[in-house]
Image (cartoon, helix red, strand yellow):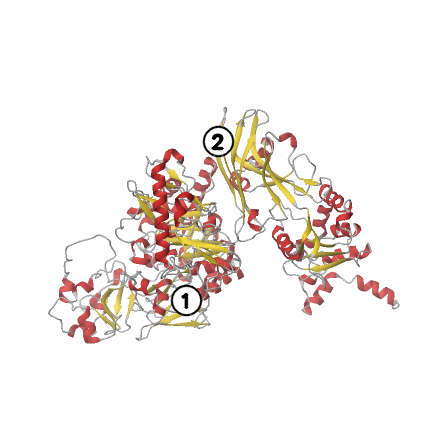
């Protein structure tokens, strides 16, 4: 065979097998998706950069209404483009750039982030416009304009998406407008109006939705709920329209901001004929107002095909309507926080017609990629001082899901664990107050957890006794959850099939069966009621030995919405391992070490659990090496420290914090030879949140809300600093990211009440002195033991389950008391720690045989000084043992009386974690509300000078800060919760400025306004309140408000 010519050789090279070419590039390490030509991309690479595929642009070019309207708007208005500089955002294959060049533009800057730009360059060269059209690859937020160009005269952008803003690039276009467009510049197009209309669509609904009821003879109706949950993008026949068209909102691109994307619009639709309404249709009309003749792109039904089509929202039921009857409601859409190209939709409407009545709330949320599942504990209210947490302390926008812990069981049915869970007379219960937050954040989901460490497995055994008892539990659970307005059930049985938790091995299979029955029951109820299916989740052990005994993972996956991995409490005072209780990595790289997060995650994946269904458990607390680790007053648990306690220990008690680079976690240790404690901080939470993203897990599970610095009192990082760190990383809201540094000085006022006298965990008052037990009479007091034996842990000679804790003897902060080991454990006098042996083997004589106890020789004092120091002899609230999540899942004692507090009508913009734009500190009960500037310096807070108005100056604009102390008038709660955009009026004008003295709802409410800005909270006033009374209340409220401002601003930051 002869040697090919040079030309032939070149031709052969052009047809080099693609796989061979790519293999060569990969071998050289030269593959770069951003630089790859479209024809060199594999199907996988096309998926990662789908805009590079020609088929996407073919569909756009064949959309005649879209393409021809842009062409006519540009080419027929040459006077707008001649000798102008044009910016084409998202140019694709460059069709709009070609139109602009033909219309006489001096320069067209074509910006495109995908690899289709390589096609575009060739197309422009082929049409000989390459001297006019300049290409820039990248996002418009990241690029630099060609040299010498600072501003442009015209911006062309197809910024419209489905329903106008869904999957659109509106944020990028607004950014480019603000940065590059001249003050007299032109946007193409520059205005759009969103419309709604009602349609009859029975045939389609039957075909697309009801079809799932019988698929080749099989019942697949469970899919219907998911089909109904998503809006449909399709072309609607104009003959289906049965109401008039209602304009929801008009957007002017010349002036609108990102905040204007959100819609909250009332609508009123009038029936055009007697008919049925099955769905609402949303569409838009975009305008080019710079054109002398009206030029629009209409996506209305019947206006012609566009690739935007229309967006259809189906009802779970239909409306029978007569001619001229009116249907009213509210349409809203909001930017999705995790992905600003996505939107959450909702429609609320009610209809009372001659033939039918219907009230429907449709919520179609673009789900955030990462869930943040937070536990609220119903016993945290019992802690003293600043450690007490109520439902009103929850930030309703911090977590995507909040789980109420716990409920108990009685006769295989759910019952409240605490008296305050349910309503007591006129006093709302915690269930009601907890779920009221869903009226503030409509995307929030709440679940009820059943079980917990203390409940053990006895009640579980009753549920799984037979299939009949399982069904009874499932059916009663549905009624209970719906009654108390929960969205799902979280199973926290610790642990089925694990012998040391007194659960026989066959419980492993029974747990699976119970979950299958629960899921089937939830599905059946949703299908029958039309409600969204109740969620079903489970908190699962993370230690390998318990995973193997407890769960049939592959069988559980199909019937669980997700799993809450209890990846904490791997270690603690019950074992001899000095590793962190919740480390990402192994401490010593030991091959047999399985007690760390990364192993648990990988092991669950090996067993068949999808990463998307794993919520990584993150504890907002620390654990010590021994029960004698540093102790503080709020939690009152040995070997255990909440995050806010660790802040105080570091700053006020001079404990030292160190960082373990191997485990990626912090430790603290004290100055008096105390053992160290593995804790958490903002830095460790960043690592764990990034681990979730790196491994594509479903999100984070937080145990618990009440152990973070939920009031922002102790760590100087704002409220909920650990959870906000997780949210900031997972949802990309870096503005929420707290600073890593905690307080530099001890928060004196808070610390004063931080360490109350040791007291029993009960709020029941008594005047009687507690009786001494026989053990008390026989044993020396803690003061006697500590005075004679000094610092250490000393075994109790009268009971092997207890010991004396002597710490910091002689110091101001020292502690001397008797502690009790967790259930099933005894105090090992040699190893100085509690060791678990099980209740059946807890024989004190055998366990401590031969040990000579130094406490036996302690001389007892003759007075009763130690009596009051030993109130917690029985150890009812002490550490219960080595559990995955046993940390503090404890049943507490009697509930304290709680004040009457209602969740008032509020909007999500009042919470700093609801919107990216505002930084707001909000306490729904009392405290301060500050609207601060984004550009304020890191450590500055909203302050009021006594000699100035109540305004502060920020670098960008003026904001105000004022007191929002709860003011009680005639036994009713009057609150202020919104600020003005200008300083409030002087004190003398307060009464005159109190407009809107309305008596809505038969004189029971009042709306107060000033500074042309509504305070916007409707408050209950006594039933017979007159307008005169309202005026007096308003006058008094403003007077007190001004007084509180002067007093509070003298000494405090808010």
User: Considering the image in quadrants, where does the N terminus appear?
Assistant: bottom right
Q: Is residue 456 above or below residue 639?
A: above
The circle on residue 468 is none
Q: Please tell me which residue is depicted at 26% across the width and 60% down the height of the picture.
A: 839
Image coords of residue 506 (percent x, y): 37, 52
User: x and y percent of residue 544 in the render?
Assistant: 42, 62
Of residues 84 and 344, which is closer to you in this image? 84
Asked if residue 52 is positioned above or below residue 861 in the image, the reply reads above
* Real-space Cα separation, disc 2 to disc 1, in angstroms: 54 Å
Badge 2 or badge 1: first in the primary sequence: 2
> In the image, is 1018 to the left or to the right of 896?
right
Assess whether mark 1 and mark 2 are in contact (beta carbons under 8 angstroms): no
From the viewer's perspective, tell me whether residue 307 is left or right of residue 976: right
Question: Which residue is painted at 31% across and 75% down in the image?
Answer: 673
Binning the other alpha carbons within 10 Å of mark 1 as few (below 14), some (14 to 19) or many (20 upward) gives some
Within 10 Å of the Cα at label 2, are there few (<14), some (14-19), or many (20+) other Cα atoms? some
Q: Where does residue 283 sit, x and y in percent of width and height?
A: 62, 39
Q: Mark 2 sits on what residue? A: 358
| 266 versus 582 height, above or below | above
Question: With 843 as the anchor, is 215 left or right in this view?
Answer: right
The residue that mark 1 highlights is 742
């Amino acid at each position: 065979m002869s040697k090919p010519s040079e030309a032939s050789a070149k031709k052969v090279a052009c047809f080099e097998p693609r796989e061979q070419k790519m293999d060569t590039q990969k071998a050289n390490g030269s593959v770069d998706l951003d630089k790859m030509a479209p024809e060199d991309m594999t199907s996988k690479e096309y998926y990662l950069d789908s805009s590079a595929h020609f088929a996407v642009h073919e569909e756009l070019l064949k959309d005649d209404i879209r393409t021809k309207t842009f062409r006519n708007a540009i080419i027929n208005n040459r006077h707008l483009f001649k000798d102008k500089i044009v910016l084409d955002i998202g140019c694709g294959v460059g069709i709009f750039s070609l139109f602009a060049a033909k219309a006489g533009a001096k320069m067209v800057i074509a910006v495109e982030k995908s690899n289709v730009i390589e096609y575009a360059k060739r197309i422009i060269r082929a049409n000989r416009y390459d001297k006019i059209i300049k290409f820039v690859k990248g996002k418009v937020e990241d690029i630099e304009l060609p040299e010498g160009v600072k501003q442009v005269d015209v911006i062309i952008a197809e910024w419209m998406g489905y329903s106008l803003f869904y999957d659109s690039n509106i944020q990028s276009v607004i950014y480019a407008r603000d940065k590059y467009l001249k003050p007299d510049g032109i946007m193409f197009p520059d205005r759009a109006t969103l419309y709604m209309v009602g349609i009859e669509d029975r045939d389609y609904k039957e075909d697309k939705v009801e079809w799932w009821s019988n698929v080749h003879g099989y019942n697949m109706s469970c899919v219907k709920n998911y089909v109904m949950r998503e809006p449909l993008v399709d072309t609607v026949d104009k003959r289906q329209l049965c109401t008039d068209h209602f304009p929801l909102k008009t957007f002017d691109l010349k002036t609108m901001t990102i905040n204007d994307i959100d819609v909250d619009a009332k609508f009123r639709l009038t029936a055009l004929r007697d008919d049925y309404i099955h769905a609402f249709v949303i569409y838009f009309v975009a305008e080019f107002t710079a054109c002398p003749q009206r030029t629009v792109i209409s996506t209305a039904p019947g206006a012609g095909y566009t690739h935007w089509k229309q967006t259809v929202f189906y009802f779970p039921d239909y409306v029978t309507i007569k001619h001229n009857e009116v249907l009213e409601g509210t349409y809203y859409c909001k930017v999705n926080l995790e992905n600003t190209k996505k939107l959450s939709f909702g429609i609320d409407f009610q209809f009372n017609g001659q033939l039918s009545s219907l009230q429907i709330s449709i919520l179609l949320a673009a789900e955030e990629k990462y869930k943040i599942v937070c536990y609220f504990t119903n016993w945290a209210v019992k802690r003293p001082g600043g450690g007490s947490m109520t439902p009103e302390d929850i930030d309703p926008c911090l977590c995507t899901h909040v789980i109420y812990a716990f409920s108990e069981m009685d006769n295989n049915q759910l019952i409240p664990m605490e008296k305050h869970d349910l309503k007591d007379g006129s006093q709302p219960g915690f269930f009601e107050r907890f779920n009221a937050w869903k009226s503030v954040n409509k995307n929030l989901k709440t679940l009820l957890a059943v079980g917990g460490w203390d409940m053990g497995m006895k009640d579980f055994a009753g549920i799984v006794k037979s299939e009949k008892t399982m069904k009874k539990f499932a059916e009663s659970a549905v009624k209970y959850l719906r009654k108390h307005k929960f969205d799902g059930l979280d199973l926290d049985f610790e642990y089925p099939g694990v012998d040391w938790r007194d659960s026989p091995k066959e419980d492993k299979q029974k747990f699976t069966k119970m979950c299958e029955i629960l899921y089937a029951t939830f599905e059946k109820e949703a299908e029958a009621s039309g409600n969204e299916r109740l969620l079903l989740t489970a908190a699962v052990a993370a230690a390998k030995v318990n995973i193997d005994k407890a769960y049939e993972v592959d069988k559980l996956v199909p019937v669980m919405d997700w799993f809450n991995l209890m990846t904490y409490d791997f270690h603690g005072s019950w074992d001899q391992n000095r590793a962190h209780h919740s480390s990402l990595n192994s401490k010593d790289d030991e091959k047999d070490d399985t007690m760390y997060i990364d192993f648990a995650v990988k092991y669950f994946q090996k067993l068949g659990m999808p990463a998307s269904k794993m919520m990584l458990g993150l504890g907002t607390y620390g654990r010590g090496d021994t029960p004698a680790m540093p102790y503080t007053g709020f939690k009152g648990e040995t070997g255990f420290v909440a995050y806010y306690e660790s802040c105080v220990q570091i700053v006020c008690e001079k404990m030292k914090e160190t960082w373990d680079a191997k485990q990626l976690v912090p430790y603290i240790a004290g100055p008096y030879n105390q053992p160290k404690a593995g804790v958490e901080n903002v830095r460790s939470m960043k690592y764990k949140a990034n681990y979730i993203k790196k491994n594509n897990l479903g999100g984070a599970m937080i145990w618990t809300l009440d152990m973070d610095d939920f009031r922002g009192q102790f760590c100087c990082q704002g409220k909920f600093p650990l959870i906000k760190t997780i949210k900031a990383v997972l949802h990309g809201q870096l503005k929420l990211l707290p600073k890593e540094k905690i307080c530099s000085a001890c928060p004196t006022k808070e610390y004063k009440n931080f360490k109350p006298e040791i007291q029993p965990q009960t709020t029941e008052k008594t005047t009687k002195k507690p009786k001494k037990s026989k053990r008390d009479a026989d044993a020396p007091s803690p003061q006697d033991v500590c005075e004679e034996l000094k610092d250490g842990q000393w075994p109790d000679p009268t009971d092997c389950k207890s010991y004396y804790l002597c710490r910091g003897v002689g110091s101001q902060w020292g502690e001397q008391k008797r502690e009790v080991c967790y259930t099933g454990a005894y105090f090992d006098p040699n190893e100085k720690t509690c060791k678990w042996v099980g209740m059946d083997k807890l024989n004190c004589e055998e366990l401590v045989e031969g040990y000579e106890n130094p406490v036996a020789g302690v001389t007892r004092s003759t007075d009763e000084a130690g009596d009051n120091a030993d109130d917690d002899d029985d150890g009812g609230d002490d550490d219960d043992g080595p559990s995955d999540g046993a940390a503090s899942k404890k049943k507490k004692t009697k509930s304290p009386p709680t004040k009457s507090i209602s969740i008032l009508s509020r909007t999500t913009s009042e919470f700093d974690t609801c919107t990216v734009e505002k930084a707001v500190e909000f306490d729904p009960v009392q405290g301060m509300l500050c609207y601060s500037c984004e550009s304020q310096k890191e450590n500055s807070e909203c302050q009021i000078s006594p000699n100035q108005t109540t305004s502060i100056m920020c670098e960008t604009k003026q904001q105000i800060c004022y007191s929002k102390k709860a003011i009680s008038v005639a036994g009713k709660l009057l609150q202020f919760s919104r600020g003005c955009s200008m300083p409030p009026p002087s004190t003398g004008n307060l009464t005159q400025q109190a407009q809107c003295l309305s008596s809505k709802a038969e004189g029971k409410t009042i709306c107060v306004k000033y500074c042309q800005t509504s305070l916007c909270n409707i408050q209950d006033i006594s039933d017979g309140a007159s307008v005169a009374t309202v005026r007096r209340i308003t006058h008094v409220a403003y007077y007190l408000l001004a007084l509180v401002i002067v007093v509070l601003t003298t000494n405090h930051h808010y």
